Amino acid sequence: MPDFLRQLVRKTSMKYRKMSIQAIISITFTAVAVIGITFISLSLVWRFSSEADLQQRSANQRLLSQVNSNLDNYLRQIMQVSDTMYYRVIKNADLSSDNMQQSFNLLYEENRNSLVSIALFDRQSNLIAATPLSSLKEHANPAQQSWFPVALQRVENLHFSNPHVQNLFDDSTHPFRWVVSLSRHVQLTTDGQIHDGVLLLDINFSGIEHICRDVEFEKNGYLYLISNDGEIIYHPNQQLIYANLLKENNLVAAAYPDGTHEEIFETAKRLVTVKTVGYTGWKLVSVVPIESTFQNSRQMILFGISLLCFSAFLMAFLNFRISAYISDPIRQLEHSVRQLESGKEDVEFSQAGSFEVQRLSHAIRSTVSTMRHLADDIIEQEGQKRLLELEILQSQINPHFLYNTLDSVIWMIEAGRHQEAILMVTALARLFRISLSKGNHLIPLSNELEHAKNYMTIQSIRYKNKFTFQIDADPSLNYLYTLKLIIQPLLENAIYHGLSETDEESIISIATYQKENELFIDVKDTGFGMTQEFAQSLLDNVTPTTQTKGSGMGLKNVHQRIRLTFGEEYGLSIFSQPDKGTLVRITLPLISQEEAKKHSEGGFYVPQ
Amino acid sequence: MSRSKKRRNVVEFSILLFLFFLVVISLFGADMFRPKKQSNPIEISIIMREQDNALWANARLGMEQAAQNYHAELRLLAPSSANDTQEQKALLERELTGGTDAMVIIATDTEEISAMLNTFDALPPIIFYESSPTEYDFLISPDNASIGTILAEEISLVYPSHHVIIYHPFTENSGVCLRVEACEDLLLSSGMTVSIVNELENLSFSSEKETVIAALDPSSTQELVSKKKTLSSANFPCYGVGATSVIAAALERGDLDAICAWSEYAAGYLAIEQAANLALQKKQQPLSPLSVTLVRKEELYETNNQKLLFPVAK
């Protein structure tokens, strides 16, 4: 493919890709319609032109046939007069005794509109009888006129001459008449002797002219009559041709067979139809300029163009409306989505358009609504998280625990219990260090257990002989990470709520183990216990969170934090019976170091 | 409505309007492209120099045919007495004042007609017939000099020793004058004797030489033929000019030995054709003189001569 064509194709396809739906629909439908209609119009125009051309040719032939018939009838009528004259009058008469003048006069009178004269000559061209005039011109010599010898040469036939000025009779009223001579050989009888003669009927040229004259063809078409050698007998512009002011293609037309022919004459294209006139061998020739058939075609072509334009107009109108109906709602939808992208809150989604567009609009609306709700949920969750983290932060520097512990340290120092004081301060320092954990929310399980241990160390010093503390941790789980500060609040609860009503030394234990893909941390005490219903109520959202005496965070806080961070399938479970103690089970996902690192970099935790 | 939607509506409306305009144009285009016929006929005044219908019959046939073809209306005007210059001038003035689209003038006196035309500021297209003033280009006429020459040649060939009388009553007619001059010149150069007369009465015939009389315009020829028998008992040869039926009959009878003829029908047709075209402001070139033919009496009924002398009248 040449380069420029390739470039054109590329540019066109690029433009096409950037076009709107309406433009594509409009242009495509209109183009298809226009092409289709053009094809149909051209077919119709071609078909009609061909048909019109055939019709015209057929009409010309019919008209020509009609004129031919009329002319033939006219000439045959004259021939019948000649036959009548010969067979009824001349053949049976003896010139020596019979007078034919009366018969001549009678026949002439009956046909005076058509005939100029009837004359009978002998072989020596002597006038025997004639009507209406009886004397020849002084210098008239019938034998030298063409009609005379031809009649004698071909005795069987009747002969029609070309038009000529009559040169026979002395007629002062019409001295130089144009006539067509009908001559024939006759047998004359004089005293029983048969000899040759010539019967002449001079036909008034105006009779032939009258038959041919008023024939109208399409648009300046005309008809003329020629002899079999091409000489013009009648032409509507006969005198102009005789005066050399006009030319006609009569000699060529004489060679055409009957039928329709196309010819070019003096740069003009013409449709010529030829019909031979019966006995005479004359030819009727009709001439129709082919521009006139083209003129009809031009009309047809203009009509076709008009049809095409109207169809294009209609299709364009319909396409614009239909494509607007389809694309406007889509455009509105697109506009609404753009508004949404730019952050606008109250974006309206139009209900208009076709069924599919309505469904699309509805789906987008639903999606946007869902997104909004999800966003709201996330915001709420983040808010809760922030709140809980704030609580942690608060608990991390809970003044009550701090100065109670410091108080304890002071009186231990005062009491000389230095080792216990050192132990307590050390445990406190470690406690706060792990509490902070450089701001990380997920810390190794070992750190969380150590934090619990440090807490219990402090509390065991403060609450001497109230309880014993055990940690049963699976060391193979130490690589796992956990949410920080989730065990200590449980221990705090166990101390303040589980053991507060009893004098016996209770046991508080922590056990960690893995089951399937979950990490379990059980905090158990052998304290007072509670009803299971009450235990369940500690974690629900209905029961308000109570501020505790210890670090200040409750079970609910821990439970919500775990669920917010890891999902609702994780969290706390409380199992308790009165007087039987309480087991609080922490269920966590298995979190490796990498996962904990991702979480700390800002991503949401997604359990594997 | 957003700006882009408004713009789109404007574009759509413009396209629809354009297409609708095309529909209307193409529907009425057929009529627009159809050649328009002239609504009013072209008025052409023909100022003749005499009323003799027989003289102008063939020319009139041609004029009428042309008038039909060119959608023209003819007004034929002639002075009541033949070749009356003053009356002709009066007719001319009346037509020019009254207004006409074009004129054909068969002038009796070309100089006087020319002087009279010069007094008008604006003139319609004028075609002169037969003879014209020198400053006018459009003239329909046979080759006048040829007429004189052809006749002179014939006379000098057939009657080399005869005395020739040229009958020339229309001395103001420049076209006829040209014929006479040409004829006389050739005859004289052939060694013949020539006399020019302006009336046929009191002609004197020489006893030493036989006489030939020639008339060099149709009217004079007809007069010559009609008065031939009264002029002399001798059957002197006559030659004439023109193709009227009277002249043709005289030729047939032998009253004329030969005539110089041209197609009066063609002359009349061409005069009106040129006048109509000039009236329609179409460019026209002056025509060449019409060709002339010598027709002897024995050749009268030859086919070409029949066509020349006897128009097929519709």
Image (cartoon, coloured by chain):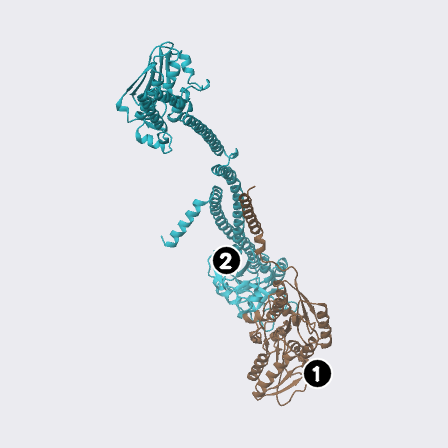
Chain colours: A cyan, B brown
Q: Which residue is mark 1?
A: B201
SS under mark 2: strand
Chain letter belonging to callout 1: B
Any part of residue B264 in sight: yes
Image quadrant of residue A132?
A: bottom right
Which residue in the protein does label 2 denote? A272
Q: Is residue A531 above or below residue A14?
A: above
Q: Label 2: chain?
A: A
Q: Is residue A134 left or right of residue A14?
A: right
Question: Can I make out residue A169 in this image?
Answer: no
Q: Residues within 10 Å of mark 1 (few under 14, many from 20)?
A: few
Q: Residue at point 64% right, 88% down? A: B206
Q: Nearer the viewer, residue B86 or A227?
A: B86
* Residue A508, quarter of picture: top left
Towards the viewer: B138 or B307: B138
Q: How many marks?
A: 2
